[in-house]
């Protein structure tokens, strides 16, 4: 079966997952994390992709990013592969690919799921049992969002700014939101939709998106195949 075309919507947030091949580590020491972030920052700026949130786990990573055009996200991920993978292979005397296939992505309904997805990403180390609190993990955007450290990689989304009129107010509200955690159901839904390339949002969001992009953005329900009524 031919794979679905990757759905990219300029200006809209996307949740991105990239995994190491065979669940192998993609970061082994501090320099690896720093090098990856260096390439991510450079690639994102060059190809006009705003990074809103991220976490770098030992064998995979998550991004919440808004590309300015239809090609920027792919070009950023290709840029990282072009420079980080050779760095990693030379350093650890290995050959071949580092990634488990192409990166996975899902378009996010900003109003309903942006902050949920950001929290989901930054709580990964807590869910994995690596740290007790997200602020204890160095390689994520959480510390930036709660005012513990400035991260020049991050472009703050308007919905984050809407949390308060001052940096202190925004940071306090965001910290409170993260303290509410993310349900297992929401975490599973975000992960599965991203791995399968489906949009994440309300039914009205998905219907409007499907009409706009002229391709299916949700799974076909069991039963008779559904026909799309495309305008034009």
Image (cartoon, rainbow, N blue to C red):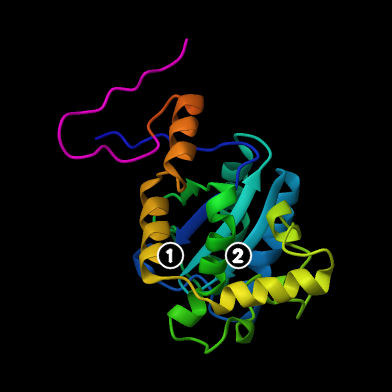
Closer to the camera, 102 or 10? 10
First in sequence: mark 1 or mark 2? 1
Magenta residue span? 217-232
Residue bearing the label numbered 1: 20
- Label 1 to label 2, Cα distance in Å? 16 Å
Element marked by disc 2? strand
Q: Residues within 10 Å of mark 1 (few under 14, many from 20)?
A: some
Rendered location of residue 30, percent (x, y): 63, 81
Is residue 117 found left or right of 136 in the rendered image? left
Rendered location of residue 150, percent (x, y): 79, 72
Residue bearing the label numbered 2: 54
Residue 219 in magenta? yes
Rendered location of residue 52, percent (x, y): 67, 58
At 81% from the left and 74% from the top, the residue drawn is 168
Is residue 50 found left or right of 219 in the rendered image? right
Q: In this view, does 38 lie above or below 4?
A: below
At 56% from the left and 43% from the top, the residue drawn is 74
Element marked by disc 1? loop
Q: Residue 52 carries which label?
A: none
């Amino acid at each position: 079966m031919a794979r679905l075309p990757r759905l990219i919507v300029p200006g809209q947030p996307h949740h991105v997952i990239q995994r190491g091949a065979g669940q192998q580590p993609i970061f082994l020491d501090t320099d690896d994390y720093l090098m990856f972030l260096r390439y991510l920052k450079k690639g994102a700026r060059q190809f006009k992709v705003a990074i809103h949130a991220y976490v770098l786990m030992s064998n995979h990573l998550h991004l919440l990013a808004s590309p300015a055009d239809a090609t920027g996200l792919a070009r950023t991920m290709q840029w990282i592969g072009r420079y980080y993978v050779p760095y990693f292979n030379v350093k650890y005397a290995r050959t071949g690919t580092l990634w488990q296939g192409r990166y996975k992505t899902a378009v996010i309904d900003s109003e309903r799921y942006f902050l949920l997805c950001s929290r989901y990403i930054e709580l990964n180390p807590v869910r994995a049992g690596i740290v007790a609190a997200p602020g204890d993990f160095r390689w994520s955007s959480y510390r930036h969002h709660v005012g513990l450290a400035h991260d020049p990689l991050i472009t703050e989304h308007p919905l984050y700014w809407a949390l308060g009129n001052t940096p202190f107010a925004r940071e306090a509200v965001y910290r409170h939101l993260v303290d509410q955690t993310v349900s297992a159901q929401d975490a599973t839904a975000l992960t599965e939709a991203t791995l399968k390339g489906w949009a994440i949002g309300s039914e009205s969001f998905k219907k409007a998106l499907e009409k706009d992009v002229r391709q299916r953005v949700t799974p076909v329900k069991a039963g008779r195949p559904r026909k799309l009524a495309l305008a034009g």
